[in-house]
Image: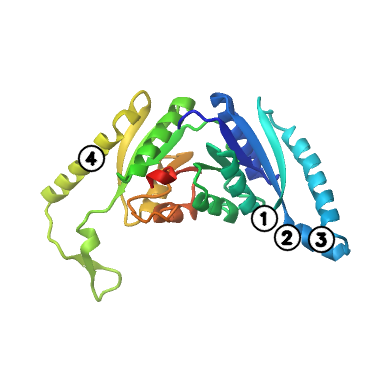
Amino acid sequence: MNKLTHILVAVDFSTGSRTAYDQAVRIAGVHGAKVHVLHVVDSSAVAALASSREEAFESQARVATEGAGVALSQWMAQSPAPANYQVTIALGTPLHEILEHARLLQADLLVAGIAGAGEMPAGAGSISSKLARKVQTPVLLVRTNHPEPFSKIVACIDFSENSRAVAAHASAIAHMDGAAVDFLHVCQEPWSAMAYPTPFADTSVPSVVTTLDDREVFTQGLHKELHEFVGDAGQGIQSNEVLHEAFSHGNGIAEHAQQSEADLIVVGGKGRTNLRYVLLGSTAERLLTRLPCSILVVKLPVENV
């Protein structure tokens, strides 16, 4: 994670956004960054309220935004204030306004709670999931009730160019917080992917006959590739290079994160795909549905995608 200058944190007064705000303030303090606090008043809710009261939309919008401003000031006073910050109350569609503010600010990092007002027990909420998909800025989705420094990070490596950014971000956070990092590669033996189903239940038979030597050579090759790929990212921190076998990359990452009691997953927004219009890879998409902890989604600059 390079030096941060502008951090945008989206808040909706939920417990999840409280933790996101506290993390944003903490990270900004380390980097000397400016914190931009954004709360969006949903224009569709204002329109519905104005209609039910038979009032003009503009009048109801003014009341709603003024009230939100007072509420946000009181809400922010319950946590330590950032050294340098700006508060914005916007009226519109929450997702659009957050994305637009991230673009206009050229934010180095967007922070939001994984769960908003709905307080989902697992997985990312609808707004946070869409933010991870649509914004080009690195997105930190914070698990509720975790404002502290991170202690165990899982950096997901698939040997793509985006994974180099993943390794660098994970290493930088580990240096910042004194965290340990597992540089994780989820793999599947190639012959397992070429197994054919049998007529009996869910069993299958491999189409390629392999030996223990084949498996050993395959595993050793992956260990070597992972070690060379991580390179200097593992220097100066407590780190492990881990192979985890699973049929699904998303499930494998979630399984390892749970087993290792990780509190942060760092994953690339795109993996080995060459599709320029894809902003979030299939692994990250699946992972968002079963997040066991906070997640940082890292994306390459558009010109590098």
| Residue at mark 2 to residue at mark 1: CA–CA distance | 7 Å
User: Residue 1: image x %, image y %?
Assistant: 45, 32
| Residue at image mark 1 | 93
Q: Earlier in the sequence, mark 2 or mark 1?
A: 2
Q: Are marks 2 and 1 in contact (CB under 8 Å)?
A: yes
Is 19 rendered above or below residue 51?
Answer: above
| Residue at image mark 4 | 225
Which amino acid, by three-letter code, is at mark 1? Thr
Q: Are marks 3 and 4 in contact (CB under 8 Å)?
A: no
| Residue at image mark 3 | 49
Q: Earlier in the sequence, mark 3 or mark 4?
A: 3
Question: Does residue 278 appear to the left or right of 75 in the view shown?
Answer: left
Foreground tag (3 vs 4): 3
Q: Earlier in the sequence, mark 1 or mark 3?
A: 3
Camera-nearest residue between 86 and 11 = 86
Camera-nearest residue between 212 and 13 = 13
Which residue shows up at 39% across the image and 50% down it?
270
Secondary structure of residue under mark 3: helix
Secondary structure of residue under mark 2: helix
Q: Earlier in the sequence, mark 4 or mark 1?
A: 1
Quarter assignment of residue 21: top right
How would you rate the neighbour count of disc 3 (Cα within 10 Å): few for under 14, some for 14-19, many for 20 or more? Answer: some
Which residue shows up at 26% across the image and 68% down it?
203
| Residue at image mark 2 | 44
Q: Earlier in the sequence, mark 4 or mark 2?
A: 2
Is 175 rendered above or below residue 303?
Answer: above
Which amino acid, by three-letter code, is at mark 4? Glu
How would you rate the neighbour count of disc 4 (Cα within 10 Å): few for under 14, some for 14-19, many for 20 or more? Answer: few
